[in-house]
Each structure stands twice: as C-alpha cells, then as structure tokens.
Image (cartoon, grey):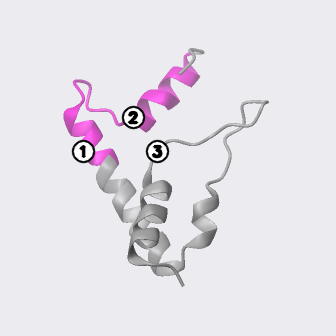
Amino acid sequence: MTTRQEHDALVETVASAWRSRDPQGRIQSVAAWHDLDEAGRLEAYEAGCLERLMEAALDVRRLSATAHVVLSRIMGERE
C-alpha cells in the first residue's frame, strides 16, 4: 500500500511525457506504471491527456511537447 503522496508521485511520473532511452536510443517503459493499480493508471492517463492539452494551448503551433519530439525525430533532428 502506498501513501497518497507516493501515489501522486507515481501518477505524475507516469503522466509525464519524458521517457528515458537506452544506449541504442530506444524509449524505455516507465517503471512507475507497474506500481499503479488500474485506477491509478487511468488517473495517470487522464492527467497526461490534460498535460498535453495544456502544452498545446501554450504553444504557438498548438503542438504538445510530445508532438514536437515526434516531429523532430521524423525530420532527423535531435531533441
């Protein structure tokens, strides 16, 4: 059982758009995902969706941080 503070930290970690990469550049899964139950994972998903919407609302091109990273990788640029 986790405390509310621990639960919130796990949700925040999972909701974040940032993902680590291995030495070959492959995106790694978020370990915190496995520490959340189904309700916590849904909470993290909803928080992530809200974060992407807020990022896009603040961006001049209306793109989230995730969209910027994906487009830069498609264009062959480095993040």
Going from the N terminus, do you reach mark 3 or mark 2 first? Answer: 3
Question: Is 4 left, or right, of 24 in this rendering?
Answer: left
- Measure the alpha-carbon separation of dots 3 and 2: 7 Å
The residue that appears at 22% across and 24% down in the rendered structure is: 60
The residue that appears at 27% across and 47% down in the rendered structure is: 53
The residue that appears at 49% across and 64% down in the rendered structure is: 10
The amino acid at mark 1 is Met
Q: Position of residue 5 (x, y in %)?
A: 39, 70
The residue that appears at 52% across and 79% down in the rendered structure is: 38
Query: What kind of element bears circle 1?
Result: helix
Q: What stretch is highlighted in magenta?
A: 52-75
Question: Is 23 left, or right, of 41 in this rendering?
Answer: right
The amino acid at mark 3 is Ala
Q: How crowded is mark 3: few (under 14 residues within 10 Å), some or many (20 or more)?
A: some
Q: Name the residue under label 3.
A: 17
Q: Nearer the viewer, residue 22 or 54?
A: 22
Q: Where is residue 42 in the image (x, y as percent from the top left)?
A: 44, 72
Q: In which quarter of the image is residue 21?
A: top right
The amino acid at mark 2 is Ala
- Quadrant including the N terminus: bottom right
Q: Which of 10 and 67 is in front in this view?
A: 10
Q: Mark 1 points at which residue?
A: 54
Q: Mark 2 points at which residue?
A: 65
Query: What kind of element bears circle 3?
Result: loop
The answer to the question of whether label 3 and label 2 lie on touching residues, with beta carbons closer than 8 A, is yes
